[in-house]
Image (cartoon, rainbow, N blue to C red):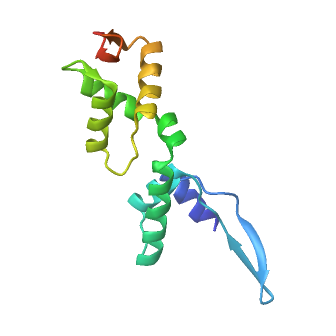
Amino acid sequence: MENICIILRELGILPSEIKNYIKRNKLRHYISITGFYNYKKYVVDIGFASKSKLIKIEKQIKNVYKNKSFRLKLGEPRENIKKILKDSKLKTNEISDLMRNKFQDFKWDNTTIMEHLTKLEKEGQVQKVKVNNRYYLWNLINQ
């Protein structure tokens, strides 16, 4: 079991400590693998012989990745927003529409996009201009 843990660590997958339990008067050993990146790396680098286990883990990965707080921590959407704003000034709802088209399995709403834009603005990467006291146009600041 220790050798399996060593191989997993070499692949960049972090297993738990080896744990034990007794079943039918026999000592059994097991490890756990938790966390989005460990799941994803395991699926890509090792995989499963069992189709049902593969489907189950892919569903867990998708559920974690859809989580709003996870996406916000990940920061990846901000990079995509910057790419979208590279060539033109856009309204918040236009950015939301483009993000929905690009990442169809996410639920992009204007509030989520505003959180990203506000963070980018605080970092000095984008700026907003109010138009007719009705809406903002966002653009990328040249860096």
Residue that appears at 23% across and 20% down:
86
In the image, residue 49 sits, relative to residue 10, either above or below, namely: below
Position of the N terminus by quadrant: bottom right
Instruction: Please state if 141 lies on the left or on the right of 67 as rendered.
Output: left
Residue that appears at 42% across and 15% down:
121
Residue that appears at 41% across and 67% down:
47
Q: For the view shown, which residue lies furthest in the bottom direction?
A: 24
Foreground of the two, 115 or 12: 115
In the image, residue 21 sits, relative to residue 99, either above or below, namely: below
| Residue 50 appears anywhere in the view | no
| Residue 7 appears anywhere in the view | yes
In the image, residue 96 sits, relative to residue 87, either above or below, namely: below
Residue that appears at 40% across and 32% down:
110
Q: For the view shown, which residue lies furthest in the left direction?
A: 87
Count of numbered marks: 0
Instruction: Please state if 30 lies on the left or on the right of 119 as rendered.
Output: right
Foreground of the two, 91 or 118: 91
- Location of residue 106 in the rendering, given as x and y in whole percent from the top left corner: 39, 47
- Location of residue 64 in the rendering, given as x and y in whole percent from the top left corner: 51, 52
Position of the C terminus by quadrant: top left
- Location of residue 102 in the rendering, given as x and y in whole percent from the top left corner: 27, 42
In the image, residue 5 sits, relative to residue 65, either above or below, namely: below
Instruction: Please state if 55 lies on the left or on the right of 131 as rendered.
Output: right
Foreground of the two, 15 or 57: 57
Residue 87 found in image quarter:
top left
Residue 77 found in image quarter:
top left
